[in-house]
Image (spheres, coloured by chain):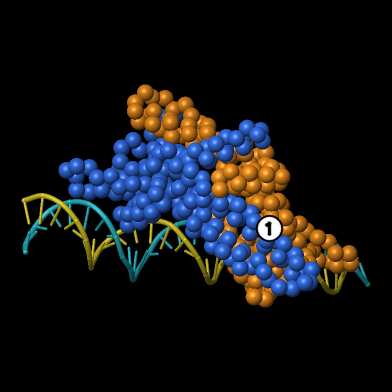
Chain colours: A blue, B orange, C cyan, D yellow
Amino acid sequence: MELKEARDKFVEAWGAFGSAWGINRSMAQVHALLMVSHAPLSTEDVMEQLNISRGNANMNLRALIDWSLVRRVLKPGERREFFEAEKDVWKVATHITRERKKRELEPLVRLLDELEDIPGATAEAKSFRKMTHDLHDLTTRLDTLLEHSTRRDVQWFVKAATTLLK
Amino acid sequence: MELKEARDKFVEAWGAFGSAWGINRSMAQVHALLMVSHAPLSTEDVMEQLNISRGNANMNLRALIDWSLVRRVLKPGERREFFEAEKDVWKVATHITRERKKRELEPLVRLLDELEDIPGATAEAKSFRKMTHDLHDLTTRLDTLLEHSTRRDVQWFVKAATTLLK
DNA sequence: TTTATATTTCAATACTATTTGAAAATATCA
DNA sequence: TGATATTTTCAAATAGTATTGAAATATAAA
């Protein structure tokens, strides 16, 4: 397989993977394109290589910057902006999980916290409390875990876990 | 807060949480409803409580059974089927992650495996190989981790990790 | 300034995913 | 068996999301 073909496959697969996990296809594809690009790209480059509109490219580049997955690069003497992706996959994983933790996990933890002390002594109420309590416990653990995970921690953790459970 | 209100909030939140993670809202809501229901529910109950159509209820109940998150329950003397959710949240977490691993992580690992040996000695080719190799490593570790995770392992792990990293 | 270039915005449009509902299939009972 | 209850299917309708593209805004050079 040629490098060009491999890149295209990666861009496509990363797009599909992202969209299965609630990240829009274009955003994931723009990210993938920057991950496999050797040099920083301009908005025009992105538009051209992915066949997407200026608005779309702009929007998703900004979203990626917001997620700390992409940074702006200024080339001396060049007027327009270039963009470059974080290529350290561990950092990428950390940034993605942190962002999602903040956006989706935290609100759930907050709600579960509220649901902790629903009154009632019926079996129904008890079973509800147990379920939400356990879920609260799980999500809180996850939250803490992600909160304190630096790259090295994650690496250590995943490695240790993989070995132990193999 | 009343039990009824708490349930509704939970159903709504679980639906939103699911849809942020690429699981359709109805499926997540049906799951949530069964999680907070004391007794098994019939298709009609689900339709009524969530205000969804028969087709929708049926489809999602089947999908949930497929994911091992819900089981059919037959009541003696009753003709129709009832449904009951797995309420052990650790099992729920395990089933969800396994299912998604199978559906979305595995295909990605397979592609990355193919992309391992793209030829070329240019800096471009090298950088591509490094990125895909690292990603392959990370996803494979994750895959192994999830493959071997039983409930107890997960519990032990998350607990240990949370403590260590706190 | 003015002119040229680049970026951002957003209403209109296209696209995708979900949901409906009624018909068909299936299962149970008398 | 026929009558009745229940489940399943799926084409069409609807709702939800993403994308376009051109105008508005911003920024830099002349």
Residue at position x 56%, y 48% from top?
A: B166
Name the quadrant of the N terminus of chain A: top left
Residue at position x 38%, y 31% from top?
A: B127
Decide if residue A104 is in sight here.
yes
In the figure, residue A166 lies in which quadrant?
Answer: top right
Which element is circle 1 on?
A: helix
Pointer 1 residue = A134
- Report the chain holding disc 1: A
On screen, residue D17 above or below A159: below
Which percent across, then down, holds residue B28? 62, 61
Which percent across, then down, holds residue D15? 52, 70
User: Relative to residue D23, is residue B3 drawn left or right?
Assistant: right
Which residue occupies the extreme top position in the image? B121
Q: Decide which of A101, A117 is in the foreground and name it.
A: A117
Q: What amino acid type is highlighted by mark number 1?
A: Asp
10 Å crowding of disc 1: few (<14), some (14-19), many (20+): some
Which percent across, then down, holds residue B4? 68, 74
Q: Decide which of B138, A18 is in the foreground and name it.
A: B138
Decide if residue B59 is in sight here.
no
Which percent across, then down, holds residue A92? 45, 43
